Amino acid sequence: PGKLIRTFEVCNINQNPRLQDNWLATPFLFRFSAPRVFVTLRFSVRDCASLRSPSPSCRETLTLYYKQADSQRELERTWKAEPSSGEKDTREGWVKVDTIAADKSFTKVEPSLPHQYQPDRYRRVNIKTRSFAPLTRNGFVLAIVDSGACVSLMGVSIFYRRCPATNRYLASYPPLECTATQKVNGWCQWVGASVKRDMSPIKTDQPA
């Protein structure tokens, strides 16, 4: 028996290019103390050249955006997704992370049942990781934008990296959220041990 998986799919490649602006956004996510966040996308894309009548606006990419805020209510007041035709890196508070191109694509519709897992399909699944910083507000929302691709989004992982506390070369370093190679203040370890000694004169039974 196959293993069912849930996906988000869109394939509006024959529509008006101005209408090919599909946004999929996460809920408001608290960043806690993370200064940088990483995102891993798992997706598959159909090859534009394999279509019977490919549209000039057909793409094989996804675009990643994020927007910072202090609360979900603030995001609801300022929510606005402008059309993608402008190709602006910043749009009403949305910051572009990257345009992610597919390294693998499929050329025809699979004969099996929709959404049914098969090992061969994973040969055409793209796994891409991106990161963004600096994060200075309480949280953020992440948006994945399709602007003319025939794409299936299978998974999104959002995480940050934390370096644990460590001891190296007689020095101790605290845990912290990792961004890149950076200087960290530590402290020297006390490796000596104090010994309490009785300094009173030694008594003997011999007469002085």
Image: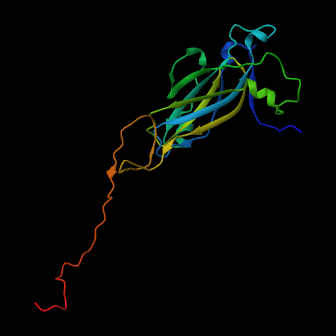
Q: Quadrant of residue 76?
A: top right
* Residue at the image position 85 percent from the left and 30 percent from the top: 114
> Number of labelled discs?
0
Q: Position of residue 14 (x, y in %)?
A: 76, 13
Quadrant of the image for the C terminus?
bottom left
Q: Residue at x 36, y 47 (%)?
A: 169
In the rendering, at what x and y percent does residue 144 appear? Answer: 62, 28
Q: Is residue 87 above or below residue 1?
A: above
Colouring used for the render: rainbow
Left or right of residue 23: residue 53: right
Q: Kindly give the residue lying farthest to the left in the view shown.
A: 208
Residue 7, x across and y down, in percent: 75, 33
Residue 171 drawn above or below residue 17: below
Check the picture and name the quadrant holding the N terminus.
top right
Above or below, 184 relative to 52: below
Left or right position of 184 against 33: left
Residue at image point 58% right, 33% down: 39
Which residue of the protein is positioned furthest toward the front in this rendering? 206
Left or right: 8 with respect to 82?
right
Residue 112 placement: quadrant:
top right
Residue 50 in the image, given as x and y percentages of width and height: 78, 11
Placement of 49 over or under 126, stated as above or below: above
